[in-house]
Amino acid sequence: MLVFDVELLSFTSPPTAPPDVKAPPSDAKKTPSGLAHKVIKPGTGSRRPTASSSVTVHYSGWTTDGKMFDSSVTTGQPASLSVERSDSRLD
């Protein structure tokens, strides 16, 4: 028999689906492959990554019916990505 004593230390609510999750907004940019993307809130810093940089980001993904299928926000583990590789996947 195992017995666990659990103490809740914090609670993270999942992000809500964007209102335009069913289709890309009209002002979204599209890559040649058809991927649509939009900057929701631009950064304010003066430092910018280069193609050889690695960045750490939080992300969330939803299906077009508003169901979240993945989120680094809810797991509390941001993803580290190579900018050069990320750009190539957007084409």
Image (cartoon, rainbow, N blue to C red):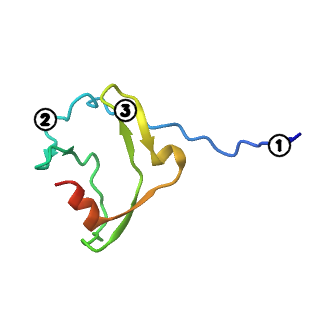
**Percent x, y of residue 25:** 18, 35
Is the C terminus in the top left, top right, bottom left or bottom right quadrant? bottom left
Q: Which residue is mark 3?
A: 17
- Residue type at tag 1: Asp
- Residue type at tag 3: Ala
**Sequence-wise first label, 2 or 1:** 1
Q: Which residue is mark 2?
A: 26
Q: Nearer the viewer, mark 2 or mark 1?
A: 1
**Percent x, y of residue 59:** 39, 48
**Sequence-wise first label, 3 or 2:** 3
Left/right placement of residue 21 relative to residue 27 reads: right
Q: Which residue is mark 1?
A: 5
Is the N terminus in the top left, top right, bottom left or bottom right quadrant? top right
Residue 3 vertical position relative to residue 53 in the rendered view, above or below? above
Residue 67: which quarter of the image? top left
Q: Secondary structure at mark 3?
A: loop
**x 27%, y 64%: residue:** 85
Residue 65: which quarter of the image? top left
**x 39%, y 43%: residue:** 60
Q: Work out how far the residue at label 3 is from the one at label 2, CA to CA, in angstroms.
A: 17 Å
**Sequence-wise first label, 3 or 1:** 1
Q: Work out how far the residue at label 2 is from the one at label 1, CA to CA, in angstroms.
A: 51 Å
Q: Work out how far the residue at label 3 is from the one at label 1, CA to CA, in angstroms.
A: 34 Å
Residue 69 vertical position relative to residue 58 in the rendered view, above or below? above
> Outermost residue, front direction?
1
